[in-house]
Image (cartoon, helix red, strand yellow):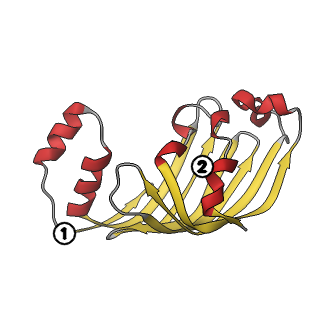
């Protein structure tokens, strides 16, 4: 297993563009591990730049599991913790299975999804099963949203109670 605190230096995020490019600079891992079960990269190292290797059938394969990952995220007051699940990358497609974790009173009981054409159009399909505290969810949105109109609306927003969310 690879310690979470060492992950940031190993990620090839610049190979992805658009929403699939995780804002790694906003994340600071503090615990947990990543276990790599299979990793294959075929081709030339220059093909990694810009993600060309991901578009070649059979060139990139990754199967891994995240175990008890915890990290801080720029803009959030608490760490995200207990993140576990599996990751599969085959060519230009990403699959996430069995993810769960928590932030404050928010609990993700299950998150699964896929992204096809990672380096291009990026077709997404996700499902989420979560329990949220409405007031805390509004606070999280206030911390993360940057759009002026939305930020202004969130300043005035109030919420309370529990939300049981099941979305596909």
Q: In the drawing, what numbered circle is on residue 70? A: none
Mark 2, secondary structure of its residue: strand
Relative to residue 15, is residue 162 drawn left or right? left
Residue 83 position, x and y percent, is 52, 67
Tag 2 residue: 114
Q: Quadrant of residue 1?
A: bottom right
Q: Quadrant of residue 146?
A: top left
Q: Residue at x 20, y 32 (%)?
A: 149
Q: Quadrant of residue 97?
A: bottom right
Q: Residue at x 20, y 62 (%)?
A: 135
**Most distant residue in the right direction:** 43
- In the rendered image, the quadrant that contains the C terminus is bottom left
- Res. 109 in view: no
Relative to residue 53, is residue 88 drawn left or right? left
Mark 1, secondary structure of its residue: loop
Dot 2, how many residues are within 10 Å of its Cα: few (below 14), some (14-19), or many (20+)?
Answer: many
Q: In the drawing, what numbered circle is on residue 161? A: 1
Residue 119 position, x and y percent, is 65, 32
Residue 144 position, x and y percent, is 32, 46
Relative to residue 5, is residue 59 drawn left or right? right
Q: Residue at x 51, y 55 (%)?
A: 28
**On screen, 123 above or below 90?**
above
- Res. 6 in view: yes
Residue 76 position, x and y percent, is 35, 54
Compare marks 1 and 2 and give the one earlier in the sequence: 2
Dot 1, how many residues are within 10 Å of its Cα: few (below 14), some (14-19), or many (20+)?
Answer: few
Quote the CA–CA distance across marks 1 and 2.
31 Å
Q: Residue at x 66, y 49 (%)?
A: 9
């Amino acid at each position: 297993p690879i310690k979470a605190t060492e992950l940031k230096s190993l990620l090839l995020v610049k190979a992805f563009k658009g929403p699939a490019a995780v804002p790694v600079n906003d994340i600071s891992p503090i615990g947990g591990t990543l276990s790599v079960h299979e990793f294959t990269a075929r081709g030339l190292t220059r093909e990694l730049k810009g993600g060309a290797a991901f578009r070649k059938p059979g060139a990139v394969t990754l199967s891994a599991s995240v175990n008890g990952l915890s990290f801080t995220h720029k803009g959030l007051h608490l760490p995200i913790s207990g993140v576990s699940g599996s990751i599969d990358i085959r060519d230009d497609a990403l699959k996430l299975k069995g993810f769960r974790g928590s932030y404050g009173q928010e609990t993700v009981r299950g998150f699964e999804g896929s992204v096809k054409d990672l380096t291009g159009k990026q077709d997404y399909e996700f499902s989420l099963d979560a329990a949220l505290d409405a007031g805390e969810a509004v606070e999280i949105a206030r911390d993360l949203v940057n759009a002026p109109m939305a930020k202004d609306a969130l300043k005035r927003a109030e919420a309370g109670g529990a939300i049981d969310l099941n979305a596909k």
